Amino acid sequence: MELRLHDRVETKKAHPCGGKLWEVLRIGMDIKLHCLKCGHEIMLPRRKAEQAIRRIIVEEETHHEA
């Protein structure tokens, strides 16, 4: 799975707050995720994080070169 810093991801299971959307804050042996609903941050081993992620949300770039 190709994760990049500040990607937004959707998890298979919801966080206890009900949110499924997370932002990637750190990538390495562990992945640090920030819940976009309640602000909680978690660190998971890369393998466990990749299993928990359903999809990477692709947003269209708002910057256009002139």
Image (cartoon, rainbow, N blue to C red):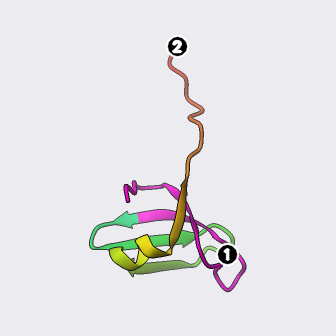
Q: Residue at x 37, y 55 (%)?
A: 2
First to last magenta residue range: 1-25
Q: Secondary structure at mark 2?
A: loop
- The residue at which mark 1 appears reads as 38
State the image coordinates of residue 60 (x, y, percent, origin top left): 59, 37
Q: Quadrant of residue 14?
A: bottom right
Q: Quadrant of the N terminus?
A: bottom left
Q: Residue at x 63, y 67 (%)?
A: 36
Q: Is residue 60 left or right of residue 18?
A: left
Q: Is 59 drawn above or below residue 15 in the view shown?
A: above
Q: Is 42 drawn above or below residue 58 in the view shown?
A: below
Q: Is residue 66 left or right of residue 28?
A: right
Which amino acid, mark 1?
Cys
Is 33 magenta? The answer is no
- The residue at which mark 2 appears reads as 66
Choose between 20 and 32: the one closer to the eye. 20
